[in-house]
Image (tube, helix red, strand yellow):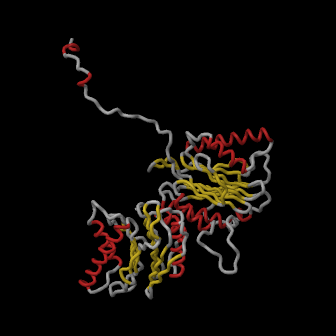
Amino acid sequence: MELNGGSVVAMIGKDCVAIASDLRLGNQAVGVASNFDKVFPVNDKLYYGLPGLATDVYTLKEHLRFRVNMYRMKEEREITPKTFTHLVSSTLYEKRFGPFFIEPVVAGLPTATELDPHPKPFISTMDTIGCITTPKDFAVAGTAQDKLYGVAEGLWEPDLEPEDLFETISQTLLNAVDRDALSGWGAVVHIITHKEVITRTLRARMD
Amino acid sequence: MALYSQPPMSYTQEPTTAPVEHRFNPYSDNGGSILAIAGKDFSVIAGDTRQSEGYSIQTRYARKVWQLNDKAVLATNGFAADGTNFVKRVKQRLEWYEHAHHKPMGLKSIARMIQTMLYGKRFFPYYVYNILGGIEEDGTGAVYSFDPVGSYEREACRGAGAAQSLIQPFLDNQIYFKNQQPEAGSEKFVPGNLPLSTVLSLVVDSFTSATERHIEVGDGLEIYVVMQKGRSADDLLDEKKLAPGLKVEELGALGEGEGERTFLVRQSLKRD
């Protein structure tokens, strides 16, 4: 975690979810790149973030892309956020005694089905070996985790509309990473609604 | 004669064990958090009342914030034994000063004195982070924060202790307006000008948030409010304007009293 740095935060709103990350890639205290995205799409209703060891970010991202594509072909449908969380979890637990150094965060909007006509927005997070937690407010991970907890606990409120959720998650991330030497160097935010996904790159402190 | 029946074992054949080193550790960490915010004509200094060691709670009520004189309040955090002893010695120095100069010591002078007292123990430090709040000689609210060996600075706000990492970025955002910009045409944000009611809400929110996510913070909250002389205290004493659950009490003047007023606001925090 402290080798490359980086942080991810996800939040639940009213019929929307948001996930955001910083863009720093470092080698301990030395900044290396300011375009290192840690949040990836699964489909247009489901995103996930992988803060942690950069080499494992790539490995895990490609591995999950493979497993989600296999799921799509076999099931002929899109994976739900909940199923995807368990897919990530079991992938991580496979490496129980030599883990990926990553704490994933998943954020998605489940599509309505006959069984569940009004699904709730979904976020989840895991430790390095895949132990799942599914909060009903926000999930944080990365080197600025404790700072993110502090700001998110102070700023977040229930049932935020997409634009208010964008403001809340952006302020949470920016103010947390500004107090973390290993996170920052730019930020990107994704707001997932039923209509569209809004992706914005934020202007941030570059020190 | 059994004592002599066996030949004495030579020392070279004796079983040997590695020497066990016993060493007294003079420090410990007692958790908790403190926070101070300066206003235009007031200063707010707060701390929780939980005192812990490791995963054990020693007491749910231990003081971390201390009234020094009519215009200064000191909050200590870190090793509680060092904290109480340090405050004791600061108070003693303030008393000596009053005897010598027939007036209470000014806030910035207390700050400089604290620096020399802390640096005086540079090689066996008080394991304490101090935050000094109060009213400056020009009547403005002030906050001074210190590290354990006396490095200090005057600021508009500061959080310290176990939950510093949770509190400080929130304060950066809400007090220093970091990562915020005023709407086009409206006034520039200036830190340290917020009304008392807003500051009190931010202090309470900071501590309830820290209590929620940090195991060493909780039980009770003590907020000291120091007001400039002549300032109306209606915004604090009017029960309707105050958030529910807060209890206010005025602390009487210490000594002569030059007009500054100090209030103690208490609130309970989660105990789990």
Position of A49 with respect to B208 (left or right) is left
Quarter containing the N terminus of chain A: bottom left
Residue at 67%, 54% in the rendered image:
B133
Q: In the rendered view, does A94 fall on the left or right side of B209?
A: left
Q: Percent position (x, y) of residue B94?
A: 72, 42
Task: Say which of A57 and B267 sits in front.
Answer: A57
B167 up-or-down from A164: above or below? above
Q: Which of A118 and A61 is in front in this view?
A: A61
In the rendered structure, the answer to whether residue A31 lies left or right of residue B114 reads left
Please provide percent x and percent y for residue A148. Answer: 49, 66
State which quadrant residue B230 falls in. bottom right
Residue B47 makes an appearance in the image: yes
In this orientation, does residue B266 appear? no
Q: Is residue A159 above or below residue B242?
A: below
Q: In which quarter of the image is residue B223?
A: bottom right
Residue A193 in picture, x, y percent from top left: 45, 84
Q: In the image, residue B240 lies at what x, y percent?
A: 68, 68
Residue B168 or A5: which is nearer the viewer?
A: A5
